[in-house]
Amino acid sequence: MLTITGLMKTYRGGVQALKGVDLHVPSGMFGLLGPNGSGKTTLMNIVATLLEPDAGKVVMNEVELVTHKDHGRRMLGYLPQEFGFYPSLTAEQTLDYLAKLKGVWQPKERREPVVMSLPWLYNPLLFGSGPTDTYHSSRFELMYWQLRAPIY
């Protein structure tokens, strides 16, 4: 469950992206829709602990995310619309890196989900045909969600 109370964010130049947002999101699937410039990205960046709000609280499963970022990041999985990766890394290295970002620090804990994800990256039945030495960010987006961080 996610509860947002009085969330405010103003950028330099006086642009007010969030003006006292209050929102309660129960467990399950939730869509956030709105026109360009309505504050959706700002809101998601604050919830994902990537941006500091000027005021307000964000509580997920009884954890205040603004003040307990590390704990919150272990619970969260945030995949922005534009998902970039390092082209110099192999598929396995990229998945290993993403697992570390999700808080899976022990190599033994990372190894199994990373290795199990690799066949999905190159499966032509799922992603169409193409050279096996290339991969698309959409494939990593799917694999990212397969990586689980330990909950403390």
Image (cartoon, grey):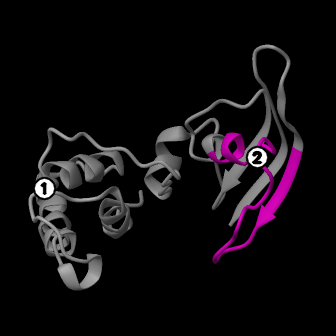
Q: Residue at x 64, y 48 (%)?
A: 44
Q: Quadrant of the C terminus?
A: bottom left
4 vs 52, left or right, is right
Q: Residue at x 27, y 82 (%)?
A: 126
Q: Residue at x 80, y 52 (%)?
A: 35
Q: Which residue is mark 2?
A: 36
Farthest residue to the front: give it: 130
| 148 is within the stretch colored magenta | no
Q: Quadrant of the N terminus?
A: bottom right
Looking at the rendered image, the disc whose residue lies closer to the viewer, 2 or 1, is 2
Indicate the position of residue 92 as horizontal and vertical percent values: 13, 56
Instruction: Using the image, determine if residue 44 lies above or below residue 124.
Output: above
Return the mark for residue 131: none
Indicate the position of residue 81 as horizontal and vertical percent values: 53, 52
Q: Amino acid at mark 1?
A: Glu
Instruction: Using the image, determine if residue 115 lies above or below residue 95.
Output: below
Indicate the position of residue 21 as horizontal and vertical percent values: 86, 46
Indicate the position of residue 118 as horizontal and vertical percent values: 15, 68
75 vs 34, left or right, is left
Q: Amino acid at mark 2?
A: Asn
| 40 is within the stretch colored magenta | yes
**Magenta span of residues:** 21-44
Q: Secondary structure at mark 1?
A: helix
Q: Residue at x 78, y 26 (%)?
A: 54
114 vs 11, left or right, is left
Residue count near mark 2 (Cα–Cα under 10 Å), binned few <14, some 14–19, many ≥20: few
Instruction: Using the image, determine if residue 145 lies above or below residue 137.
Output: below
